[in-house]
Structure formats: C-alpha cells, structure tokens
Image: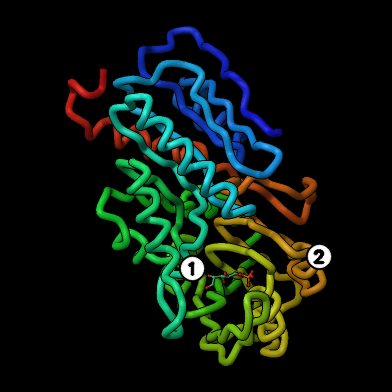
Amino acid sequence: MRGVGPGREEAGATARAPLFTGTANPGLAEAVARALGRRVGACAVERFPDGEVSVRFEEPIRGCDVHILQPTSPPVDANLMELLAMVDAARRAGARRVVAIVPYFGYARSDSRHGRREPLLARLVADLLETAGVDEIVTLDPHTDQLEGFFRIPVHAVTAVPVLVPAVRPLVAAGAVVVSPDAGRVEMAGRYAAELGTELAVLHKRRRTGAEVEAIGLSGDVRGRNCVLIDDMISTGGTLVEAARVLREAGARPGFVAVATHGLLVDGALEKLAAADIKRVLVTDSVAPRHEASTAVQVVSIAPLIADALREIRAGEAPAARE
Ligand code: R5P
C-alpha cells in the first residue's frame, strides 16, 4: 500500500486548510506548500490489494477551502481515480470549496475526435471532476486552450515559460533557432523565440500511432544553426526524435536542446532522445521525475508558479472568504 503521511505543522499556521496531495507528486506539493508558508495536510491515500483506492482526510476540513494537488500523470487512470476520490471525500467532509491543482492534465490530447466511433476523453475527465465536486482547476500548459471550454467551472491555466526561459537561455547559442515540432505548438514556441530573441522554424507532423510520428515538412531556415526544440510534453520522445532527424537532414548543427513543460518520459524516451543527438532536455516537475539526475536532463520547479496562482485565486475571493 502506498500512502501520504501527515504533514508538518509550521509556526504561525492559520485556520486555513493545508495543501493536500495525492501520491502522484508529493514532492511538488511540499515545494508549493513551502512557497506559500503552509503545510501538507494529513490524508491517507492507500490501495486495497485488488487495486481499489482508499482515501481518508485525517484532519477536519469542514467549511475550509481545500486545495488538492495531483497531476494525472502515468499511471494516468490510477492517479485520476485517486484525485476523484479525494475530491469526493473533501466534499462529503463539508469542504467549502475544492480547488484541484492538476499540473499535468492526462487525456488533454483527446480533445477532438478523429473517427466517428472514438471518445472525447478530455471532456469526459472534465465532467468527472465537476461531478466529483471540484470548484476550480489550476493547470499548467494544457495541451490546448480548448480544455477550458470543456469545463463550466473556472480553469486557471499557468504557463511554465517564466521558469523555463531563464533555464534554457544559457544553452541558446548565437544565431540559434527555436523549432516547433508541430503546428499545435507554434504559439508556445513563438513565445520562447520572442523571449530568447531567436527566429522560429516550424515542422509539420503526422501521427501514425501513439508512438510513431512522421515529419512532413519544415518551414524556416535551420542550415548551420543550433536548434532548440519546444514542446508541451515529451511522452515516448517520438515527436522530438523525428524532429531531430528532419533538422539534421536540413543541415542543422548537431547537438539539439529540447524544452518541454511535461516530462512524462515513458518507454525509454531519454535513451531515444540521446540517440537522436538531443544532448540537453529541460522539463518541469509537473510530473514527478522518475529518472536519475544527470547533466542531460534538467528539471525546473514550477512550485513558485503554482504558489502564485493559488495566491491570485485567494486574492480574488471576497475578503470574508479569505479568513
Ligand atoms: C502532440 O501533439 C504533443 O504536443 C506532443 O508533441 C506529443 O504528445 C509528444 O509525445 P511523444 O513524445 O510520444 O511523441
């Protein structure tokens, strides 16, 4: 059974509820709580031998604003169910409001149907969260802005650009080009290009399967230049490996840098990226890092961004609700 133990009481704690976390990324919850001068609350999250989830808040939360941090990263379904169970438990315990902080939002890529007999899972997950009793969502660089439209409750989307740009800046050589690996990432890559003062190139991609992609075109001049690839997530690494292949063929300088908000890094992604000459990878801790620390992979914390978002939500509430 895996569980999340009681948090520390810090001096000067107010009557506010602490920050609660599921088991997906307790390290990030600790960092966010520290940034807010709060603590991580006691909530037992366990699994029965058959895999069913069991959740119990171990301190009173009646009348409180309850903030629950849980990315729905792999194992996606287990982490999602855990979040739903925590929200339901909080509601049934009399929480006044429930804010779900979902730094990585699993199933966000299922935001449109490509065939007549396919589901729309981003919408289904939104419905599940609302039905469980979430009042507001905080998320980070969702796959598409469209995600907000699947909810009737407020969605507070934060971007990791303010922490990733300073981290990548020292790795950006003079004359480098920022590259969007597909049309869906042009806006995000454009923002990096603007902040880093580089040109922008765009690849056009076709996905064959969950792990196989094919680049079908490149707009922009990369010959003899260093390239910085920007994506919202690295899952299997297939997209960036294919991007690197096309950039090499187009005469780009060897030794690519890749920046992505969400480092899922499944299915041997890091080894594939290294073999594709992607020498440095920068991701955030929206997903709990599962790989060994190395010079090739740098993890940048989003804790200050999430803390700011929670402060902003709180500041926007009526004064009576803040006490
Ligand atoms: C796709 O549209 C996304 O923005 C990412 O490019 C993609 O999901 C990354 O997955 P993978 O690393 O498996 O190619």
Give the label on residue 109, or none.
1
Which residue extends farthest bottom?
A: 216
Sooner in the amino-acid sequence: mark 1 or mark 2:
1
Where is residue 256? Give x, y as percent: 70, 70
Whether tag 1 and tag 2 are in contact, CB under 8 A, the answer is: no
Where is residue 123? Give x, y as percent: 37, 63
Position of 81 relative to 187 (above/below): above
Q: Is mark 1 within 8 Å of ligand 1?
A: yes
Position of 130 relative to 258 (above/below): above
Q: Is residue 27 left or right of residue 110?
A: right
Q: Mark 2: which amino acid?
A: Glu
> Which residue is depicted at the point 60% across and 72% down?
176
Position of 195 relative to 119 (above/below): above
Where is residue 246? Give x, y as percent: 67, 86
Q: How is the image coloured?
A: rainbow
Q: Mark 1: which amino acid?
A: Arg
**Which image quadrant for residue 28?**
top right
> Which residue is depicted at the point 70% across and 76% down?
241
Where is residue 122? Give x, y as percent: 42, 63
Q: Secondary structure at mark 1?
A: loop
Q: Is residue 61 left or right of residue 274?
A: left
Q: Is residue 24 left or right of residue 133?
A: right
Which residue extends farthest front?
A: 50
Q: Is residue 4 left or right of residue 195?
A: right
Nearest the camera: 259 or 94? 94
Give the label on residue 271, or none.
2
The image quadrant where one finds the N terminus is top right
**Which image quadrant for residue 203?**
bottom right
Tell me the crowding category of disc 1: few under 14, some 14 to 19, or many 20 or more residues within 10 angstroms, Cα based.
some
The image quadrant where one finds the C terminus is top left
Q: Secondary structure at mark 2?
A: helix
